[in-house]
Image (tube, rainbow, N blue to C red):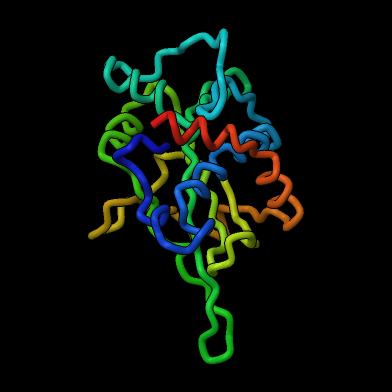
């Protein structure tokens, strides 16, 4: 979810395509077919028109209900249960240390805006975080390997001294891996109009 006050600091670094806001928005739009693959029916997506969709009550407080309806990345359904899905992207790095490949950044906290925290903690609809971790080594077209998984917001844990929340277990125990062909296929499905729509939405 990007609402103008909640943009990851990673999204404004200088390496083209790697930390850019556009990269985060592309992943947000690319998540739709991924959710379908996982068995969810997408009722509302922030990057496209959603005509004729009934509006469920998402929060008891009208202000937060409006906030969730307007800014939630996805509203999905599975087995007659509604879920809010917030797509969070995290870049990680693979570096060489004394001749061995070392991964850094996969245990970074997931950052939430204060209003997001308020809305998610007391939402009437379960909130799922679709966490996508992609490789960011300075090459704008290469993100592999990409790790992803749906994590219930309620299981995330605070990290002392940090504004964000962390996974309750190591990422390898909670996230699956996208094949290299799948990554390109998902991102290539994203139309420039989808990203433009998200950009102008805020």
Furthest residue toward right: 181
Using residue 161 as the reference point, say whether residue 120 is left or right of it: right
Q: Check the image and report above or below for 157 versus 196.
A: below
What residue sits 43% from the left and 23% below the top? 125
Residue 39 pos. (x, y %): 68, 31
Furthest residue toward bottom: 98
What residue sits 56% from the left and 63% below the top? 135
Count of number-bearing discs: 0
Residue 2 pos. (x, y %): 40, 38
What residue sits 33% from the left and 42% below the top? 6
Using residue 113 as the reference point, say whether residue 139 is left or right of it: right
Furthest residue toward left: 161
Residue 11 pos. (x, y %): 42, 53
Q: Quadrant of the C terminus?
A: top left
Q: Quadrant of the N terminus?
A: top left
Q: Check the image and report above or below for 172 versus 150.
A: below
Choose between 24 and 122: the one closer to the eye.
24
Residue 45 pos. (x, y %): 54, 26
Q: Check the image and report above or below for 14 versus 83.
A: below
Q: Check the image and report above or below for 157 versus 102.
A: above
Using residue 144 as the reference point, say whether residue 68 is left or right of it: left
Residue 79, quarter of picture: top right
What residue sits 54% from the left and 40% below the top? 28
Choose between 52 and 126: the one closer to the eye.
52
């Amino acid at each position: 979810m990007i609402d103008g006050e909640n943009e990851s600091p990673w999204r404004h670094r200088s390496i083209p395509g790697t930390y850019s806001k556009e990269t985060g928005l592309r992943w947000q739009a690319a998540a739709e077919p991924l959710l379908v693959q996982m068995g969810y029916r997408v009722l509302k997506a922030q990057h496209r028109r959603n005509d004729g969709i009934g509006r469920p009550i998402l929060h008891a407080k009208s202000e937060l209900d409006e906030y969730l309806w307007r800014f939630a990345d996805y509203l999905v359904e599975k087995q007659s249960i509604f879920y809010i899905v917030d797509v969070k992207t995290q870049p990680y790095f693979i570096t060489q240390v004394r001749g061995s490949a070392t991964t850094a950044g996969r245990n970074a906290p997931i950052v939430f805006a204060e209003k997001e925290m308020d809305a998610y903690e007391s939402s009437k609809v379960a909130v799922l975080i679709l966490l996508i971790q992609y490789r960011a080594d300075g090459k704008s077209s290469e993100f592999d390997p990409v790790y992803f998984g749906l994590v219930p917001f309620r299981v995330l844990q605070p990290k002392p001294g940090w504004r964000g929340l962390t996974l309750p277990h190591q990422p390898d125990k909670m996230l699956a891996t996208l094949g290299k062909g799948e990554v390109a296929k998902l991102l290539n499905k994203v139309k420039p109009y989808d990203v433009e729509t998200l950009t102008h939405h805020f």
